[in-house]
Amino acid sequence: MVVDPVCGATVDKTTSHVSDYQGQHYYFCSEDCKQEFEDDPERYVDWGGNTLFGSA
Ligand SMILES: [Zn+2]
């Protein structure tokens, strides 16, 4: 299980809501969260690949 970097929900890696950013996969609970992330990924992931909810 991984954490949705936008809302902090726990997400299963089998979800179809996946985004690639800086060589990492990020998983989302919904298409809305994925869209928000893709609109402004730097808001959710810092230069070290860490999210607000821990490292990816
Ligand atoms: Zn979410």
Image (cartoon, rainbow, N blue to C red):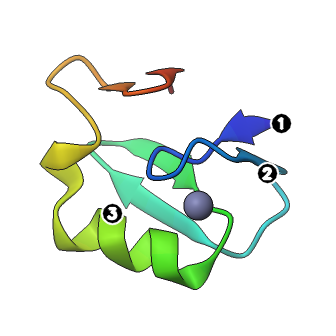
Q: Quadrant of the N terminus?
A: top right
Q: Is residue 39 above or below residue 40?
A: below
Residues at marks 1 and 2 touching, judged by CB atoms closer than 8 Å: yes
Q: Position of residue 40 (x, y in %)?
A: 16, 62
* Among numbered discs 1 and 2, the one appearing first in the sequence: 1
In percent of width and height, residue 8 lies at: 58, 41
Q: Amino acid at mark 1?
A: Met
Query: For the residue carrying disc 2, how many other residues have a C-alpha within 10 Å: few (<14), some (14-19), or many (20+)?
Result: some
Q: CA distance from mark 1 to mark 2?
A: 6 Å
Q: Which residue is mark 2?
A: 13
Element type where label 3 sits in the image:
helix
The residue lying toward the viewer, choosing from 36 and 14, is 36
Question: Which quarter of the figure has residue 23?
Answer: top left
Disc 2 is placed on an element classified as: loop
Q: Residue at x 48, y 69 (%)?
A: 33
- Location of mark 3 (residue): 37
Ligand 1 shows up in the quarter that is bottom right
Q: Which mark is residue 1?
A: 1
In primary-sequence order, the first of circles 1 and 3 is: 1
* Picture residue at 22% right of the left edge, 54% below the top: 41
Q: Quadrant of residue 27?
A: bottom right
